[in-house]
């Protein structure tokens, strides 16, 4: 039986410039997003048709999430947040198609995205607020003798943000695809075993179908959670200090 | 005992962590449901927040899974 880990292997397509199957699906996700949104909004009708409606719903959904977390001035981060959401959502959903590679199932990809978010937060925080940005680690109303411990704890929890952000997305995608592969392998093994075991073969298949439904939900949910947490961290850059 | 055996034991212990995370996720949705039964009109507005909380709690369970996978496959 083939190992469930094999599906995550990086295979080079153009070795000279290191264009791999991962790069192919990243480019594919970008093409799907840009092509889909441009195609949907090309008429720019006042009363949107179905496709333009979808684009407008996506826009308003992310805009309202961002404004809820950061206030009106957070809209300057809208291109970043919208791009992150669309990329993560499309990469996750493209990976659901059988035979396609899941870009976000590699921790380096999700870590790069998380580093982008935290880098934006830190750099924007220092540029806009200077050293007052460090007031993020000093909550108001803390007794002075407790302050050193609180600052250390707050610092550690801030530094764990890129790790948890990247690991959450990566591990959800990895676990989902491994589980799907394992149940698919069970179907094949039961069919090949012969005799009474062949009758049981549809059972792991039903489980794989249920898992596919769950994985579609997880793909969309993890993209949304990544975006919401990005908005919350950006709010820390805009309004540091509790 | 074999050092390899300890790795498999460690992977088993990590799965206990996943069970605890599952309890946490059930906690969130149980509280959401009991609140929704008391105040159905407020349920729809908080539904998205319930999912965010559940995804955060589920994330910790998935971290345990990553520990188990790292122990099993390296």
Image (tube, coloured by chain):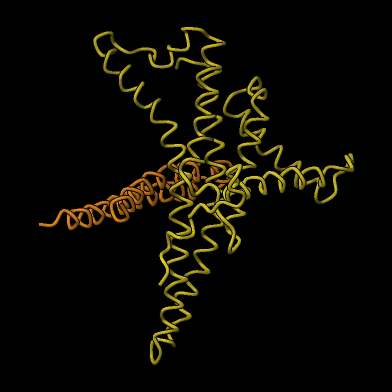
The C terminus of chain A lies in quadrant: top left
Direction bottom: furthest residue:
A195
Percent coordinates x, y for residue A215 in the rendering = 52, 58
Direction left: furthest residue:
B1
Residue A78 occupies quadrant: top right
Percent coordinates x, y for residue B66 in the rendering = 36, 49
Which residue is drawn at the image coordinates 41% and 79% (left, top)?
A: A189
Residue A16 occupies quadrant: top right
Which residue is drawn at the image coordinates 33% and 16% (left, top)?
A: A151
Which residue is drawn at the image coordinates 77% and 44% (left, top)?
A: A37
Q: How many marks?
A: 0
Which residue is drawn at the image coordinates 58% and 24% (left, top)?
A: A70
Percent coordinates x, y for residue A82 in the rendering = 65, 35
| Residue closest to the eye, A62 or B36 | A62
| Residue closest to the eye, A78 or A107 | A107
Chain in orange, by letter, is B
Q: Is residue B28 above or below residue A140?
A: below
Drawn colour of chain A?
yellow
């Amino acid at each position: 039986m083939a190992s469930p880990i094999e599906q995550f292997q990086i295979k080079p397509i153009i070795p000279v410039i290191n264009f791999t199957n991962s790069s192919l699906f990243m480019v594919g996700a970008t093409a799907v997003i840009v092509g889909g949104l441009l195609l949907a909004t090309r008429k720019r009708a006042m009363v949107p048709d179905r496709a333009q409606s979808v684009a407008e719903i996506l826009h308003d959904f992310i805009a309202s999430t961002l404004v809820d977390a950061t206030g009106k001035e957070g809209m300057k981060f809208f291109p970043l947040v919208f791009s992150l959401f669309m990329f993560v959502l499309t990469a996750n959903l493209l990976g659901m198609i059988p035979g396609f590679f899941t870009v976000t199932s590699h921790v380096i990809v999700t870590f790069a995205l998380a580093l982008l978010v935290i880098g934006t937060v830190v750099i924007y925080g220092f540029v806009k607020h200077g050293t007052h940005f460090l007031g993020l680690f000093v909550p108001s109303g803390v007794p002075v003798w407790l302050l050193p411990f609180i600052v250390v704890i707050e610092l550690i929890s801030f530094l764990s943000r890129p790790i948890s952000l990247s690991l959450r997305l990566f591990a959800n995608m990895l676990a989902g695809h491994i589980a799907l592969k394992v149940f698919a392998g069970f179907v094949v093994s039961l069919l090949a075993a012969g005799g009474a075991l062949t009758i049981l073969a549809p059972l792991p298949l039903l489980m794989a179908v249920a898992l596919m439904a769950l994985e579609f939900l997880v793909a969309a949910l993890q993209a949304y959670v990544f975006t919401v947490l990005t908005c919350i961290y950006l709010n820390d850059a805009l309004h540091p200090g509790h | 005992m074999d050092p390899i055996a300890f790795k498999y034991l460690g992977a088993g212990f990590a799965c206990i962590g996943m069970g605890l995370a599952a309890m946490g996720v059930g906690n969130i949705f149980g509280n959401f449901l009991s609140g929704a039964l008391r105040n159905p009109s407020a349920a729809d507005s908080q539904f998205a927040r319930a999912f965010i909380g559940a995804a955060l709690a589920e994330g910790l369970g998935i971290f345990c899974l990553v520990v188990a996978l790292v122990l099993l496959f390296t």
